[in-house]
Image (cartoon, rainbow, N blue to C red):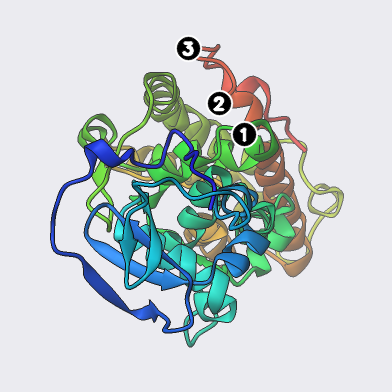
Amino acid sequence: MASTEPEDLEPPLKRMKTELQRDSDYWFKSGNVVMVASNTVAYRVHSELLGRKSKVFKDLLDHDAPQPKDQELMDGCPVVHVSDAADHFSTFLMLIYDGWRYRDEGGYIEWGVIKVMLLLGDKYDCPEFRTQAIKHLQLTFPADISDWDSRQPLIQVSPEHAISMANLTRSSDTSGMHAIALYLCCSLPIATLMAGVAGRAGDAESLCLEDLDRCLQGREDLPKVWLDLHAKLFASPLPFHAKSGCVSGCEEVIEVMQGFCKESARRDLGPNIAYDIINRARWRPVMMDAEKRGMCSRCMSFYEGRLLRMRQQFRDGLEKRFQYVRASSAYSDIIELV
C-alpha cells in the first residue's frame, strides 16, 4: 500500500484514539483494507473494488508499494482514515457495492445520495457517480417546461436541500443546476438563508456570500416578476377568434380576467410567499377562474400556450438572472409578451 495519503485524508498524528464501531453492512471477512471514517466507524472492504470506482483509491491502495513501518493495522489489514462523516462514507460504499439500492421502493432517490455522488464523487475522482448525479438532476429539473410539467421527479429535494444543491453545483459543468438551486433557495425564509441548515450527517450547510447575495436579490425581484407576468397573461394582443366574435363572448371574459389576474397576484404578495413561477400548479387558480367565467376552449388553449411560453422564457433566463451579484433587477424586460 502506498504510504502517501491525499491532503483530505487524516494524518496519523491527528487521529483520536477512540474505540471503533465496525459497520454492520460493510465489514467483509474477505476485505483486505479497513477504512475508518471520522475516527468512529470502520469498514473492512476490498481495495481492488474501491480502486475500480475511484482513481484516488486506486493510487492510494496500491499494494505493490511498500508499506511504512508504522502502518496502522486492524485484524491484520492496513487502516486508512478518511475525514468524511460516517453517514456519507456509508452511502459512498453503498454506491460502490450495491448501486441499485440508492433508489427507494418508489424509485425515488434521496437528496443525501445525490449529495454523496457529487461531493465524494468529486473528492475521490469517481466520474461515474458525478455523471449519474448530474443526469438525475437534469431529469428532475428539465430545461423544457413541457417536460417539467409531465415529469415524475426522481430526486426528493426539499427547499432546505436547495442550499446543499447550490453549494455542490457551482462548477462550470453544473451551472444550469446551480441556477435552479438558487431559484429554489429564494423560497426559503431569510433567516434560513442567513443561518443555513443542518445536514443529516450533522454537517452545517450555508450559502457562500456571493450566492447569498444572489438569493437576497432574487427574493427582492421575484415578486416584481410575479406581478408583471400576471399583468401580461391576459393583456393584448387578444386571440384572433376572440376579437372576431366568440360564441361564448370571450372578449368580455378576457377584459374581466385582466383585472382579476392583477388583483390575484397582488393578494399573493407577502414576505414568506414562494413565488414559484415555473410551477404550473401556482397558475392553476387563475386559469380555472377563466374557465369558470365561461371562456371557450379555443381561447383557453391560446392563453395556456401563452402561459407556457412565458414560463419557458423565465426558465431559460434563470442562469443569466443569477449570474451577476446585484445585477439589474429588471426581470420584466426579459419576459416578452407572446
Tag 1 secondary structure: helix
Residue 300 in view (yes/no):
yes
Instruction: Tell me which residue sits at (77%, 55%) in the image.
Output: 302
Crowd tier of the residue under label 2, counting other residues whose Cα lies within 10 Å: few below 14, some 14–19, many 20 or above: many
Instruction: Residue 275: tell me if it is visible.
Output: no
**Quadrant of image for the C terminus:** top right
Question: Residue 326, which numbered label?
Answer: 3
Front position in the image: 105 or 187: 105
Q: Nearer the viewer, residue 267 or 9?
A: 9
- Residue type at mark 2 is Phe
Please tell me how crowded label 3 is: few (under 14), some (14-19), or many (20+) other residues with Cα within 10 Å. Answer: some
Distance from disc 3 to disc 1, alpha carbons, whole Å, reads 15 Å
Seen in the picture, residue 232 relative to 54 is either above or below; the reply is above
Measured in 3D between alpha carbons, the distance from the residue under mark 2 to the one under mark 3, in whole angstroms, is: 9 Å
In the displayed orientation, state which residue is furthest to the left: 18
Q: Nearer the viewer, residue 9 or 284?
A: 9
Residue at the spot of label 1: 318
Left or right side of 2 for 27: left
At x 39% / y 30%, what residue is drawn?
Answer: 219
Query: Label 2's element?
Result: loop
Verify CB contact (< 8 Å) between mark 2 and mark 1.
yes
Distance Cα–Cα, label 2 vs label 1: 6 Å
Picture quadrant where residue 98 is located: bottom right
Q: Amino acid at mark 3?
A: Arg
The residue depicted at 40 percent of the width and 40 percent of the height is: 185
Which three-letter amino acid code belongs to the residue tagged 1? Leu
Q: Position of residue 235 (x, y in %)?
A: 66, 37
**What percent of the width, then of the height, locates residue 53?**
64, 61
Q: Which mark is residue 298?
A: none
Residue under numbered circle 2: 322
